[in-house]
Amino acid sequence: MPVPADPTVLHPMPEQPRVVLLKPLVKSPLIEVGEYSYYDDPDDPTAFETRNVLYHYGPEKLIIGKFCALGTGVRFIMNGANHRMDGPSTFPFPTMGGSWAGHFDLLTGLPNRGDTVVGNDVWFGHGTTVMPGVRIGHGAIIGSGAVVTADVPDYGIVGGNPARLIRTRYSDEEIARLLAVAWWDWPAEHITEHVRTIMSGTISDLEAAAPAGGQA
């Protein structure tokens, strides 16, 4: 019987230490990552939590689905990056210490867009940036260098700064069928048997390959 890839191995490609699976890597309770999602970086991919998830002082979460591909330099800007914009200066004086620390109340109630949520099977190109509270749909593609400031629909392709929708990969009816089949929730053994269909088959092929009785 075909054997699925191991989702608990940090380096799924031993000859390529630049690639890490994120689920076995992350330790922060504020970051959730699904199985098989990976990050690629020739410098230090294991520093993802500190180098690629920035200003994450909580309590909002970064949630990344299964089977996502993150190119080098993908960064998630979290809500801790926000500054006041309703006065003459945006500088965060209280964080610098001294007697300025007595004005920390000026930093409460800053805009907070909540959790940043990435669906399943999302491909991030090199050097993309995702702003706080953005929601990215299943099957989306984020072009290299894009700055994602707004939600991305399921199977949407976006690019630019700020990122704009270039097109969707499928029609609305086809997207509904893909979301219904939700191949990423199939048992790993079933996915293993149908890798070729998942990668290169038609939607009808995918529907025909779905496990009996629905998803796991």
Image (spheres, rainbow, N blue to C red):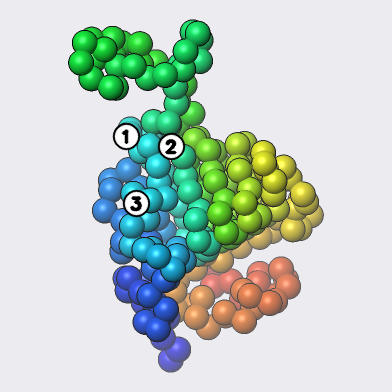
Circle 2 crowding by C-alpha within 10 Å: few under 14, some 14–19, many from 20: many
Circle 1 crowding by C-alpha within 10 Å: few under 14, some 14–19, many from 20: few
**Residue 80 in the image: x percent, y percent?**
39, 31
Whether residue 59 is visible to the viewer of this picture, yes or no, is yes
Looking at the image, residue 40 lies above or below residue 1: above
Circle 3 crowding by C-alpha within 10 Å: few under 14, some 14–19, many from 20: some
**Residue 128 in the image: x percent, y percent?**
57, 51
What amino acid type should be assigned to the residue bearing mark 2? Met
Which residue is the site of mark 3?
Answer: 49
Q: Quadrant of residue 144?
A: bottom right
SS state under label 3: helix
Q: Residue placed at 67% from the left, 41% from the top?
A: 161
Chain-order first, disc 3 or disc 2: 3
Chain-order first, disc 3 or disc 1: 3
Residue found at the very far bottom of the displayed protein: 1
Looking at the image, residue 14 lies above or below residue 23: below
SS state under label 1: loop
Looking at the image, residue 167 lies above or below residue 44: above
Indicate which disc residue 196 carries. Answer: none
Q: Nearer the viewer, residue 42 or 189?
A: 42
Q: Residue placed at 24% from the left, 15% from the top?
A: 101
What amino acid type should be assigned to the residue bearing mark 1? Tyr
Instruction: Name the quarter where the N terminus is drawn.
Output: bottom left
Chain-order first, disc 2 or disc 1: 1
SS state under label 2: loop
Which residue is the site of mark 2?
Answer: 78
Which residue is the site of mark 1?
Answer: 57
Q: Quadrant of residue 17?
A: bottom left
Instruction: Report if the CB atoms under discs 2 and 1 are less than 8 Å apart.
Output: yes
Whether residue 38 is visible to the viewer of this picture, yes or no, is no
Separation of marks 3 and 2 at Cα, in angstroms? 12 Å
Looking at the image, residue 8 lies above or below residue 14: above
